[in-house]
Image (cartoon, rainbow, N blue to C red):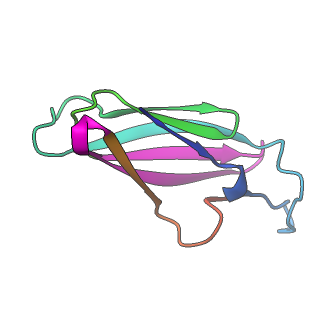
């Protein structure tokens, strides 16, 4: 069982003069890469999650429900002129009855994940 995370609330944009742009519907998001730090018992050569975007929703699926570790998902937002990357860290560990549990955090300390 995966995780769907709506990202629209974490997006913000500014114009070339630094003024906040109210309409962020023109922004695009992409998954740039996924780096895995496997936990004990997880293959060091295999990724532990797949991450895809559907509009502004990030979908994260475990590849193997028994794998544990960290996945650092690099996301990029673009308004066509500027780009901004952010890294979301997903801690994945096996819970009771082999139910996958996600713990999600991002590295920026401000409200917006992306500031363009």
Residue 43 placement: quadrant: top left
Q: Quadrant of the C terminus?
A: bottom right
Instruction: Answer with left or right where residue 84 lies relative to residue 31.
Output: right
Left or right relative to 17: residue 33: left
> In percent of the image, x 52 and y 66: which residue is there?
108
**What x and y, as percent, mark residue 31?**
54, 37
Residue 68 seen in the figure: no
Q: Is residue 3 visible?
A: yes
Image point (57%, 39%), residue name: 58
Which percent across, then down, holds residue 38? 20, 43
- Which residue is outermost to the front? 97
The dominant secondary structure in magenta is: strand
Give the farthest residue toward the left: 41
Count of numbered marks: 0
Residue 30 in the image: state x and y as whole percent.
60, 36
Q: Is residue 105 left or right of residue 44?
A: right
- Residue numbers of the magenta segment: 70-99
């Amino acid at each position: 069982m995966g995780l769907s995370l709506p990202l629209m609330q974490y997006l913000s944009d500014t114009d070339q003069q630094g003024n906040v742009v109210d309409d962020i519907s023109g922004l695009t998001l992409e998954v740039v890469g996924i780096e895995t730090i496997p936990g004990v018992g997880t293959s060091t050569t295999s990724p532990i999650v797949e991450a895809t975007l559907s509009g502004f929703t990030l979908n994260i699926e475990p590849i193997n429900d028994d794998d544990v570790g960290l996945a650092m998902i690099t996301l990029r937002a673009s308004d066509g002129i500027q780009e901004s990357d952010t890294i979301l860290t997903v801690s994945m560990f096996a819970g009771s009855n082999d139910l996958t549990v996600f713990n999600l955090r991002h590295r920026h300390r401000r409200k917006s994940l992306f500031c363009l």
